Image (cartoon, rainbow, N blue to C red):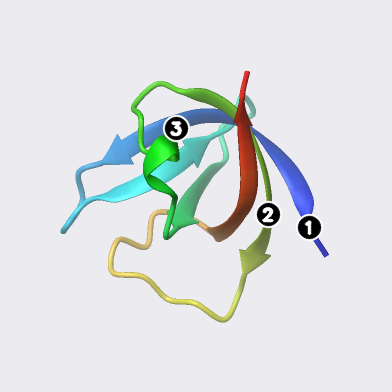
Amino acid sequence: MSDKFKGTVTHVKMGPGAWALQTSDGQQYQLLKPPADLKKEGLEVEIKGKIRDDVATAAMIGPVLEVESFKAQ
């Protein structure tokens, strides 16, 4: 099941680097294989996706969010 997440896209310079979504309530989600159009520092977005508990990442900066779709705000 998909959920909606709103926030700001950021690039975290940890290890090889990772793209993340920072929400207004302080939660950070690591974006799993984000599309090129989403990889824009400071982009305000609404993402439709799901949290993946079965995926580990090198950056380990927060829950992993698999992006199904997104729209800029």
Look at the numbered disc 2 and give the secondary structure of its residue.
Answer: strand
- Identify which residue is drawn at 62% across, 39% down: 70
* Residue 40 figure quarter: top left
- From the viewer's perspective, tell me whether residue 13 is left or right of residue 27: left
Q: Position of residue 16 (x, y in %)?
A: 16, 58
Mark closer to the chain start, 1 or 2: 1
Which residue is disc 2 drawn over? 49
Look at the numbered disc 3 and give the secondary structure of its residue.
Answer: strand
Pointer 1 with pointer 2, Cβ within 8 A: yes
Which residue is disc 3 drawn over? 9
- As drawn, the label of residue 34 is none
- Seen as rendered, the residue at the extreme right is 1
Q: Position of residue 60 (x, y in %)?
A: 37, 62
- Seen as rendered, the residue at the extreme left is 16
Given the image, on which type of amino acid does mark 1 rest?
Ser
- From the viewer's perspective, tell me whether residue 38 is left or right of residue 12: right
Please tell me whether residue 1 is drawn above or below residue 27 in the rendered image: below
Q: Position of residue 33 (x, y in %)?
A: 42, 60
Pointer 3 local density, CA inside 10 Å: few below 14, some 14–19, many at least 20:
many
Mark closer to the chain start, 1 or 3: 1
Q: Position of residue 32 (x, y in %)?
A: 46, 60
- As drawn, the label of residue 2 is 1
Given the image, on which type of amino acid does mark 3 rest?
Val
- Identify which residue is drawn at 56% across, 32% down: 26
* Residue 2 figure quarter: bottom right
Mark closer to the chain start, 3 or 2: 3
Q: Measure the alpha-carbon separation of dots 1 and 2.
A: 5 Å
